[in-house]
Amino acid sequence: MKCVGILTAGGDSPGLNAAIRAVGKTLVRGGYRLIGFRDGFEGLAFDRTMPLEEATCSGILTVGGTILRTSRNKPNKMPVGGECIDMTGAIVENYRKHQLECLICIGGGGTHKSALLLQKAGLNILTMPKTIDNDVAHTDTTIGFDTALSVATGALDSLHSTASSHKRIMLVQIMGHNTGWLALGSGLAGGADVILIPEIPYRLDKVAQALLQRSREGKLFSIMPIAEGALSREDTARLAALQEKKEQAKNKAEKEAAKREIAAFHSACSTRIFELASQLEERSGRQTRVTILGHLQRGGSPSASDRLLATRLGSECAKAVFRQKYGFMISASGEGTALVPIAEVAGVRKTVPLDHPWIESARKLGVAFGD
Ligand code: F6P
């Protein structure tokens, strides 16, 4: 009986179990055996497995998280005893030991880079795009995005009444890594007044102006979703300079130093929302409050849409195994699916295009982006 391996890597997202279930049920019906690897690529490196018979794949459609567990550890930088070690060799060995026909990796941007690395090491790989950030290239959407969108939208809905009662400005930090899909989508669906996203660097004075204008129009409260990666124009320029420095690094030490500077910059930016709240309070004369939605956005049962997506991608993924079509991501394309070479996905981030219909509609409705 041919055996296929599967793992989930990166941050979890609702719908992972639905995808595992779809792959598992379809493969088993096609006469294949499925074996799960625990904790992302770590499980493959250290041979931590979980048999995935049909019974194990049952009853998990509605369950959030991943029964396989996950981690962000990369094959070539696996933390072992305080050090980062290249475990690619061990992964290849375990793949061969289990006589895998193919390895299915369900993940986002980082997972696709790791998947490509393993493909180059000679493994048959297939992937499926999942992340609440929706930032994977060459797919219409990703598993988990729709559920997170509902959670974030629900939060904005709930904040309306308290914002209105107290005539306050509510700043809501929304996940999304370095992209604004979740903040923009939930902002539009949740009737936000100002939306800040990384793709549109904001100016403090423009944001304050928009809030003051609302007051002048008799609108006494404002709802402001802010993508966690949103930056002011000044910070965007600072980050670009740091990235340039990394690109220009002459050796490994310089590159590592530049990477550390970028990490420090991002961690300093993660608390900027509080600074921004007090600056806006001062300029608008209205009380401001900050809500950080955090990992609530990754929790809970997958939405119907995510279950449908995960099932569609998962069953097509199994079909690709039957046809021995390896080296592809099963992407969501219109009502169907498409096979996209992993090499075209790895290292490419899908950001919100500035002419995206969501941005255009928001602008038509008078939503401010602080630009
Ligand atoms: O990529 C998904 C994501 O939830 C991002 O939106 C967020 O920046 C990050 O993961 C949080 O990661 P962690 O779970 O490691 O805190």
Image (cartoon, rainbow, N blue to C red):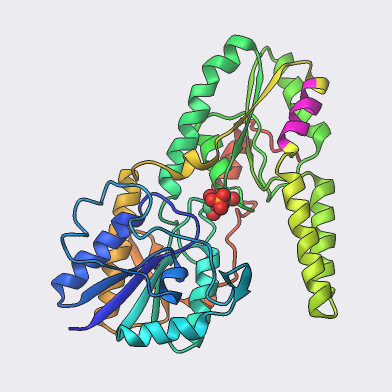
Q: Position of residue 118 (x, y in %)?
A: 48, 81
Q: Picture quarter containing residue 253? A: bottom right
Residue 210 shows up from this direction: yes
Residue range (magenta): 273-281
Residue 345 shows up from this direction: no
Q: Residue at x 49, y 25 (%)?
A: 157
Q: In the depicted view, which residue is nearer to us: 59 or 362? A: 59
Q: Which quadrant is home to the N terminus?
A: bottom left
Q: Which quadrant is home to the C terminus?
A: top right
User: Relative to 163, is 22 on the left or the right?
Assistant: left
Number of numbered tags placed on the structure image: 0
Q: Residue at x 82, y 21 (%)?
A: 282
Q: Picture quarter containing residue 285? A: top right
User: Relative to 165, is 238 on the left or the right?
Assistant: right
Q: Residue at x 64, y 32 (%)?
A: 367
Q: Main secondary structure of the magenta part?
A: helix
Q: Picture quarter containing residue 218? A: top right
Q: Position of residue 357 (x, y in %)?
A: 55, 47
User: Relative to 327, is 206 on the left or the right?
Assistant: right
